[in-house]
Amino acid sequence: MTFRYLPMTEQDKKEMMEAAGISSTEELFKDIPENVRFKGDLQIEPALPEPELVKYMSMLSQKNINTKEYASFLGAGVYDHYTPSIVNHVTLRSEFYTAYTPYQPEISQGELQAIFEFQTMICELTGMDVANSSMYDGGTAFAEAALLSAGQTKRKKIIVSKSVHPESLAVLQTYANGQRLEVVEVDTKDGLTDLEELKNTVDDETACVLVQYPNFFGQVEPLKDIEEIVHSQKAMFVVSSNPLSLGVLTPPGKFGADIVVGDAQVFGIPQGFGGPHCGYFAVTKKLMRKVPGRLVGQTVDENGKRGFVLTLQAREQHIRRDKATSNICSNQALNALAASVAMTALGKQGIKEVAVQNIQKAHYAKNILSEKGFNIPYEAPFFNEFVVKLNGPVKEINKKLLENGMIGGYDLGRDFPELENHMLIAVTELRTKSEIDKLATVLEGL
Amino acid sequence: MNTQDQLLIFELSKEGRVGYSLPALDVPEADLSSLLPDDYVRTEHAELPQVSELQIMRHYTALSKRNHGVDSGFYPLGSCTMKYNPKINEDVARYAGFAQIHPLQEEETVQGAMEMMYNLQTSLAEITGMDEVTLQPAAGAHGEWTGLMMIRAYHEANGDQKRTKVIVPDSAHGTNPASATVAGFDSITVKSDDRGLVDLDDLRRVVGEDTAALMLTNPNTLGLFEEHILEMAAIVHEAGGKLYYDGANMNAIMGYTRPGDMGFDVVHLNLHKTFTGPHGGGGPGSGPVGVKKDLIPFLPKPVLMKKGEGFTFEYDRPQSIGRVKPYYGNFGINVRAYTYIRTMGPIGLKQVSEYAVLNANYLMRRLEPHFDLPFTQHCKHEFVLSGKRQKKLGVRTLDMAKRLLDFGYHPPTIYFPLSVEEAIMIEPTETESKETLDEFIDAMIQIAKEAEETPEVVQEAPHSTVVKRLDEAMAARKPVLRHVK
């Protein structure tokens, strides 16, 4: 049997073994001791020819309900947004996707410049001075922000609002355990961080306070008030933010955030069952040399021509080893590229228009549900998600919605026992008025 | 490659141009000031570029031409396994049923995705000889940290609080000690012997009651198989430690031996290396972790299980280290890896390792007369040359790497491992033809000759790239990390 990815012919093999003075393939593996040798064939499925593989993988994919065919009101950190067609055409340029980390800048200027542009766009959106080349996702970027804060302040207490994404909170817990940091959760009040409790919790042992903006329930946290509390004790202020919302919301940088993180999935990156997405990490100038992950900087070549390189590498694991600021190596470069293309396509005007459409449509949905008598428990300003109390278990209701061609919202009872029968509904620019109306009608009829 | 100055996308921007198309708002529009408090309405625009769709495409096409990928040419970057990235993988990952599904949909609506994941984790368990695999870690470094966190949880569950040290060989990649630190361990080094293998006496000296684990790549970063692996495993296990396998070099051994059979307790794989998830210019990767039975309770949650005819995520795992990533890992990369495994099957994967090793040995023996070869035994999938001889002529390994750019190659990994002077680490992979290898050999021999006869040609390289050598010192001294208008 021959394989299309393996070019060696029997003749090649013979010539190469002769030239290298090797008598048999076996000789090349004789350093593997007999008693650890694997005998026989691996018990995995046999190879499939390409046409059969296409059929098989299509069959698996078709077992899933997808948001291309169903109108989705599910968000909770991952969203169904408009992806300009051009994004896919750029990311399929194989000079990008078959390259590795740009260690050789002379033949990697394309990737380096694309990342430099990504860093610039993230700075623009967040209102921060410096952004890195990307992180795995919003959740791990969130946790790394806490580690950076603990390192910078030499303090061990991490304070986090319970209004952040529960999975980000869970990831933070794991990372904090690794570093033996204490995580203190601050309760919510009316779907927002409880400021009184926050005030009582922040002290001079506090490394940082982490909040989300808009928060997990879609609501806009009062960053101005939180900032005062955080900085009064010289703790670091970390804000996790949906970068699309920053097309319309005041950026966290304006409110004095020290670190802003989040996920750029909203920009041209498929939901993809949760990954790969694209974390971002932005900081003030003061923290520039503490940022985890890769940074691209501008410089000149021997002839004075502008060029780009990976820089400030003294922070990183391959140089500093056990003293590195993080162990991250590979990040999400290709998805940062996708996000850059999507942000570029939207541009200065489009980012605002999309953000405005989100906020308008979500408010329309909330109003219509409210008019139909549903209880909307929280009243703070919100972006494109809100909480609604339903007449029964969310899981059952979602089944009915599915029968009507819709993917319903997130079952908040999964993470918050007090929010049983509460659904988190996301309404993006892709949902039409008639889809929203249909959602309301079906929910009303249940 | 084009040699013109390349503008930034921001420098192409002109007020009023657009590159998108959205339907008009079809719901009643409320005044923003009625929806948000004044302080929270953005007043200064984010200065994103304003360009047309064709301008965007030309811009990124131009950038792509200033980038070298595996599809552009040979990429023998040691320890990175820059093999061909199959095109069917890219197609499959974009199927709506994989790309357009939400991680929080009800399980009944994503059974196909879960079946794919289950099949992949089962296949990886078999390939590595482990009992269970989690697909949650996003990359190799993330997998290392996840594995070490499990080892820590295991020791702590045994009431063994004193195991604070992780042993790494002096040839190890810097990520190993960095991951150990992030997982709350101190790392200590074990020396290599003059054959490039872990020095058993030194290992005996450093293990003890404080040993949490030994982290090892096998074949190691010199491309050499640690022949005494069973003795090493015994030394570490007798001391009560665990054995951690860094799967960066898995491409050398598939179907020939398995980490699980060598005595390893925890394994991570880099699916973007061995299993063709593309490298993407530096990610996204995927770093699944496999464990032996006694570590299963500590796997990150949720754990994907088979339940009757279907699949489910199990969250009730009291001893789990917790979540290491939101959702279930880099699913899209896992789809690609599974597509590849189904393309190759058991026979194909074994051939992959056979040819990866043959190609490396062929290159090594053909280059041996022209460069110093510090370790002369057969190598596995990669090998390390030393540029010592050329250095005496005033030509450094960095110069030779830059000279290779003129021949259209991505240079090998250089100055790593740290234990070899002027190191040149070459990994050809199995997907390269003999013709490609021969052309590369010719180029290397020519460069060795130039080092003797016309060293300035090498010292001043590259001569043909869009930029010359860049001033990295300036970039670090006066960092410019974003464009400012």
Image: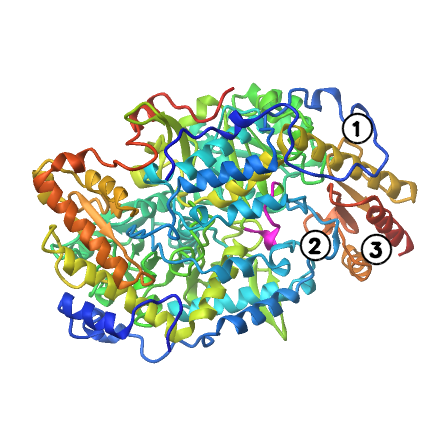
The answer to which of marks 2 and 3 sits earlier in the sequence is 2
The residue to which callout 2 is attached is: A67
Q: Nearer the viewer, residue B51 or A63?
A: B51
Left or right: residue A446 versus residue B170 is right
The residue to which callout 3 is attached is: A392
Magenta stretch contains residue A418: no
Report which quarter residue B439 is drawn in.
Answer: bottom left
Residue A173 appears anywhere in the view: no
What residue do we see at 36% from left, 21% from top? Answer: B478
Relative to B468, is A334 above or below? below
Is the residue under label 3 in contact with that under label 1 (CB below 8 Å)? no
What residue do we see at 31% from left, 58% from top? Answer: B249
Residue type highlighted by circle 1 = Leu
Relative to B421, is B117 above or below? below
Relative to A59, is B191 above or below? above
Q: Distance between the residues labelled 1 and 2?
A: 28 Å
Q: Which is closer to the viewer, label 1 or label 3? A: 1
The residue to which callout 1 is attached is: B35
Spot occupied by residue A285 in the image (x, y as percentages of width and height): 46, 22
Residue type highlighted by circle 2 = Thr
What segment carries the magenta color?
A267-275
Q: Distance between the residues labelled 1 and 3?
A: 29 Å
